[in-house]
Amino acid sequence: MKKCIYILLAFCFCNFSALKSQSIGEWRVYMSYHNATKTVPANDLVYVLSDGSLYSYNIDDTSVQTYDKTNYLSDVAIADMAYIKNCHTLLLVYENSNIDLLINDEETFNITDFMNKTMQEDKTLNNIYVHNEYAYLSTNFGIVVVNANKKEITNTYNFGFPVRHCTIAGNTIYAATDNGIYEGNMTDNLLDQNNWHFFNEMTFSHIIYFDNHLIGIGSDAIYLYNNDTRQFENFYKGNYLYCSTNENKLMIGDSFKLVVYENSIDQMNVRYFSDNTINYMTCENNMYWSSNGASGLNGYKLNDNGQLEKVISSIIPNSPRRNLDSYLIYTDKLLIAGGGIWFDRYNNPGTIMQLTDSGEWEYFDENVASKTGFAYKDINYIAQDPSNPNHIFASAAGEGVYEFNDKQFVKLYNIDNSPLEGVAPITNKYVYTRIAGLKYDKDGNLWILNSRATNASIKILKPDNTWTQLSHEEFLDKETLRNLIFDQRGWAWIVSARVETGIFCLNTNNTLENTNDDETAFWQTFVTQNGEVIDPDYIYCAVEDLDGAIWIGTSSGPLVINNPTNIFESNSCTKIIVPRNDGSNLGDYLLEHEIVKDICIDGANRKWIGTETNGIYLISEDGMETIHHFTTENSPLISNNILSIAINPNSGEVYIGTDKGLVAYRSDATSGVTQFNDDIVQAYPNPVPSYYNGTIAITGLMRNSNVKIVDISGKLIYSGTSTGGQFTWDGRNANGNRVPSGIYLVLATDESGKEGVATKIAIVN
């Protein structure tokens, strides 16, 4: 039997390499690492803080590791970090005041006390100072002391006003505050504010004790404290941003200059940088490590001329350009737009990114402003040309529509060279051309939603590069038009998101140029099955499910139009009532109190519903069952504010764009095929190794296939129905025991039992 199994190995590995990585139920976090702001060496590792996220560079083997909620970290959005050598611990403080201790780069201890403490004072972190096993967190109200050895907060000194930095000299702690410098004897009870004494009126961003001298960094110079005059004296001019102390070196720097004091303040060297902007620099083992913004981590060594020479350049993990994920779309790859518009534009930098199926992040040309003469920002929707996947159009919240080919900018369509309209009566219509929706129809026409247009709200660019417009009076001059979809009949559905909130439906009767036979409806209110009138404050999205129903995401939960063919005559809808099943015969409206930002349909016709404050729900096909409810508290989800959702129909991976970045969840549903084909039915993993205890997935099936798993003798081991085009099996028999080593046959038929397909799974124990 084992010989047969091994004969199958080559077939299995070849046939299923496309499903090589992510298991069902597994999460991935895609944080950006393209703005390095701080660098901390720790023996053979260099930790880098970038875009509020963490990665490390291994000096010995040059490997790069990222850290996130699936991998050591407890939270997202790191405000600052420091390495506590005495404890081999990296201290991480998050923007929400959560604290992680990453010990020996292999275990994490989470301290939530500071985050959970209810207080009126502002907890914003300004700086971290390390002394022995203690970390002193300077905040906008005082100092918080963390003992890394005991893994606890030991003291909190409340000044009642911001502390910018602190340092320790002997038994004295000095605090640089907005009200001057205060000192406290550490043998006294410093919890008592009366034991802190005013020391000096100078205000500094940093204060350091080095070479038996107290040094302050002001807005215009480095200041040295004179013990005789009891005053800080201007020591070296400049506007400095950071300081660090390592290996008896004090380093004080700005974006292009580094002042280094070697062992004493009498040994000073000034070094200049012209190739990169320096955000922070530190040193260990005579290797200088800098965080250089978009240039990532860089390493320098002193050359024979005493100058810092770059020897390691631009270490940046493969990652999104920015944590901006306002709009996601999956075609043959994941495409992301990073901008948006609601009451006003977001003013996010122009961002279009794509994630290929090989896992590589690619970025579209951002050198656009120099080519157009207009700011490049707030890209909010993307449409991929069905005849050329490398040809895309992207809409902006103010400048018009951009055309790209092979990720390179081609053209900007605005009020000068197209029918696009700017907002009247604003004079500068070039930056008030409100576009927030693009979609190709089945004939290859690009539909463009032009908000606040007075002539025509729908502009259409045809395949021959000519334009046409659709002007329907009930749809003119709407504030925010978005989320254009075409249903199975080819009808257009458009969301008017706010002010004159509603749903617009248009049937052109396949005569695009002739509007006389158009059917239109614009409904601002909806009547439920119980006769209740629903008047949503906001509508965020509309999507068609696999049965042709239209699901609408509103500020009052989801609405469903089950019979959209009646839309031109009726505004009837359904609010799904979920039974309480408590014997009361009562029910509740599905997610009635949730603000639904986006809805996406998976291969099993289930609904992934993203909310503004409560994470993401997976709802059954009929809406009656909540299969999953993921939040930041019970999953690696990085924010409960969901902006956009997209699904890879082939793998079932659900991409979730949040206000803090992108995550993905591998679900158990893929899109079903229309006809069985032996070449596309796949199982993963295959062979199943002895150490594997996860789910085995069989993909390439028709929707709702009937599946049986039998052993080589034909004995039934397991059976069920596929979820969309995917069936899952835990590798166990009906008694819950792992099946023995062997070859197992997967036999699948369609719902009617007329068509069938088979494949094999090898299990090795």
Image (cartoon, rainbow, N blue to C red):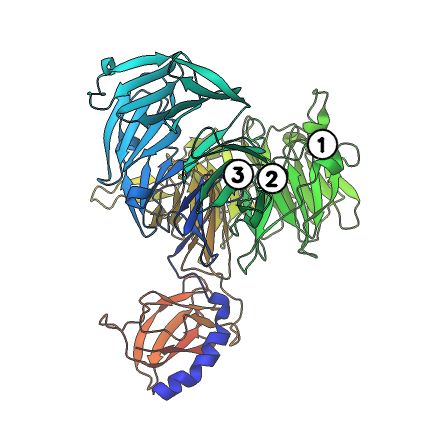
**C-alpha distance separating marks 3 and 1:** 44 Å
Amino acid at dot 1: Phe
| Label 2 or label 3, whichever comes before in sequence order | 2
Residues packed near mark 1 inside 10 Å, few (<14), some (14 to 19) or many (20 plus): some
Q: Amino acid at mark 2?
A: Asn
Question: Quick check: 671 above or below 645?
Answer: below
Q: Label 3's element?
A: loop
* Labels 2, 3: front one: 2
Q: Which residue is mark 1?
A: 374
Of the pair 18 and 549, the residue shown nearer to us: 18
The residue under label 3 is 570
- Quadrant holding the C terminus: bottom left
Residue 222 sits above or below residue 651 on the image: above
Q: Check disc 3: other Cα within 10 Å, few if <14, some if 14-19, many if 20+.
A: some
Front position among marks 3 and 1: 1
Depth check, front residue: 181 or 125: 181
State how far apart marks 2 and 3 are (Cα): 62 Å
- Residue 519 position by quadrant: top right
Q: Position of residue 277 (x, y in %)?
A: 58, 36
Q: At numbered mark 1, what does the secondary structure look like: helix, strand or loop?
A: loop
Q: Nearer the viewer, residue 542 or 361?
A: 361
Q: Is residue 498 above or below residue 184?
A: below
- Residue 626 appears at what percent x and percent y? 34, 48
Q: Are marks 3 and 1 in contact (CB under 8 Å)?
A: no
Q: What residue would you read off at disc 2?
A: 276
Quarter of the image with the N terminus is bottom left
Callout 2–callout 3 Cβ contact below 8 Å: no
Q: Amino acid at mark 3?
A: Ser
Residue at image x 37%, y 32%?
128
- Residue 61 point in image, percent of width and height: 46, 59
